Image (cartoon, rainbow, N blue to C red):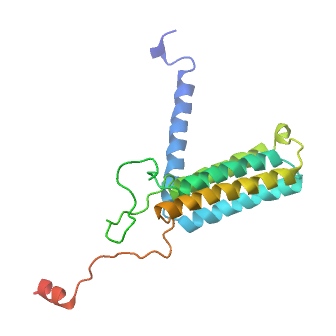
Amino acid sequence: MNLGDGGGDLPSSSALSQWTVNASRRYQHLLDKSTPLVIHRWIGFAFIAFVFALRVYLVQGYYIVTYGLGIYILQLFILFLSPQVDPEIHDGPTLPTRGSDEFRPFVRRLPEFKFWYSITKAFCVAFVLTFFSAFDVPVFWPILLFYWVILFFSTMKRQIMHMIKYKYVPFSFGKQRYTGKKASADDTDTTAA
């Protein structure tokens, strides 16, 4: 068969490929439009998390899926709280430790948008997994919950000690913001003349 004769599976393959590219572009466009809408994105995530929790509660199962989701969320949260360059292992420029040091903004290892996107995808995947009985392994869930709480507190203690040791705060609320010089009345009069 000749590829140039238009026969065979080529047109449907091309159409499927084109549809996939178009769907991918639309999806990326929606993600790009949602980037500045932080509150709306997190409200949407809260709804997805509520639906997942409601599903697990109503079915009374899938505790292994929920435990795995909790471990993944903890890992993402630690990345979200960590600086992009770990001062413990990096010899280059570090976070300022004295008032006379140059101001360097805190740059996260996992930016807020990627944190939101990853956690939302994780909840969606976990929700889909609750429809397959192979993932409904019978376990005594209080043991999993207890183990996760111990893991959470020990990991957060280590992270907080790291923050204290290297003097960084991964959150921007409460921090002083620098807006630059404000134009004085004399400056506006000279530019108008």
Furthest-top residue in view?
A: 1
Q: Is residue 153 above or below residue 3?
A: below
Furthest-left residue in view?
A: 193
In this view, the residue in front, 131 or 161, is 161
What x and y, as percent, mark residue 164? 52, 64
In this view, the residue in front, 62 or 7, is 62
Q: Is residue 138 above or below residue 141?
A: above
What x and y, as percent, mark residue 32? 48, 55
Residue at x-position 48% and y-position 10% = 2
- Left-right relation of 29 to 160: left
Residue at x-position 86% and y-position 39% = 133
What x and y, as percent, mark residue 156? 63, 59
Q: Is residue 7 above or below residue 72?
A: above
Residue at x-position 57% and y-position 60% = 161
Residue 41: name its quadrant: bottom right
- Left-right relation of 97 to 11: left
In this view, the residue in front, 135 or 90, is 90
Image label count = 0
What x and y, as percent, mark residue 88? 46, 51
Q: Quadrant of the C terminus?
A: bottom left
Q: Is residue 150 above or below residue 178?
A: above
Residue at x-position 77% and y-position 43% = 129
